[in-house]
Amino acid sequence: MSVTFDEFVKTQTEEMNETGVNVEKEKQEWANRIEELHETVKKHLSEYTKSKKIEIESSDIRLHETFFGAYEVKALTIRIGKKVVGLKPKGRFVIGAFGRVDMTGPAGTVKIVLVDENLDSPNISVTLSQGGKKEKGSPSGKKAWKLSTPPPHIKYYDMDKENFLDALMQVANG
């Protein structure tokens, strides 16, 4: 064996430290974005939760991502009569978005993605950097949660109340 396990671990740890990214800060930002999504969902359903027609529960789930390692985030469970729909974060590091949460019910799944607020479909590009300068962010600099259609022709829709309720009915088989 040309490389010992100790050397392998050392190089992997050094690479992680060389990124210059504050992992804890990134995790906290991701958790804040998830909380922002949950608040939007609760707002859209508030008239139904106030009248006790819908129940919403929050719980901790454990995720694992290469960059973050294992960590805990919040998930939501929405109960509408006998139907149960879950909003489960899938990850902060996904292709084409700054994060993804899946809304899953008995009739399927709708992806909710964190993308540039001006996008209505994916816009994947490659950025090369020189001299250690890295470009960060998105074209407008502001991110928003959007509902995503399935591939191959992906479209994004704003997370307004009407679109969200339509998606919720879709996954709940309503």
Image (cartoon, rainbow, N blue to C red):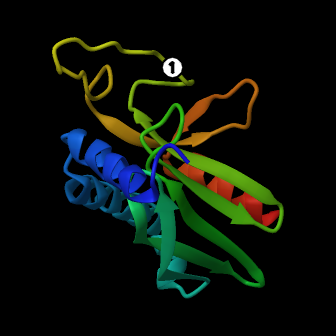
Q: What x and y, as percent, mark residue 75? A: 50, 72
Q: What x and y, as percent, mark residue 64? A: 50, 63
Which residue is labeled 1 in the image? 123
Q: Is residue 128 above or below residue 7?
A: above
Q: Is 115 placed left or right of 103 in the picture?
A: left
Figure disc tally: 1
Q: Is 158 placed left or right of 82 in the picture?
A: left
Question: Residue 95, located in which quarter of the rendered image?
Answer: top right
Q: Is residue 37 above or below residue 160?
A: below
Question: Amino acid under label 1?
Answer: Asn
Residue at (51%, 20%) from the top-left corner? 124
Answer few, some or many: residues within 10 Å of disc 1's Cα (few below 14, many 20 plus, some between 14 and 19).
Answer: few
Residue at (32%, 25%) from the top-left corner? 138
Q: Is 142 placed left or right of 127 in the picture?
A: left
Closer-to-camera residue (119/13): 13
Closer-to-camera residue (131/112): 131
Quarter the C terminus occupies: bottom right
Residue at (30%, 47%) from the top-left corner? 16
> Residue 31: in sight, yes or no?
yes
Name the element at disc 1: loop
Q: What x and y, as percent, mark residue 144? A: 39, 40
View extreme (bottom): residue: 52
Residue at (53%, 85%) from the top-left corner? 51
> Residue 170: in sight, yes or no?
no
Closer-to-camera residue (58/45): 58
Q: What x and y, as percent, mark residue 150? A: 73, 37
Q: Is residue 143 above or below residue 7?
A: above
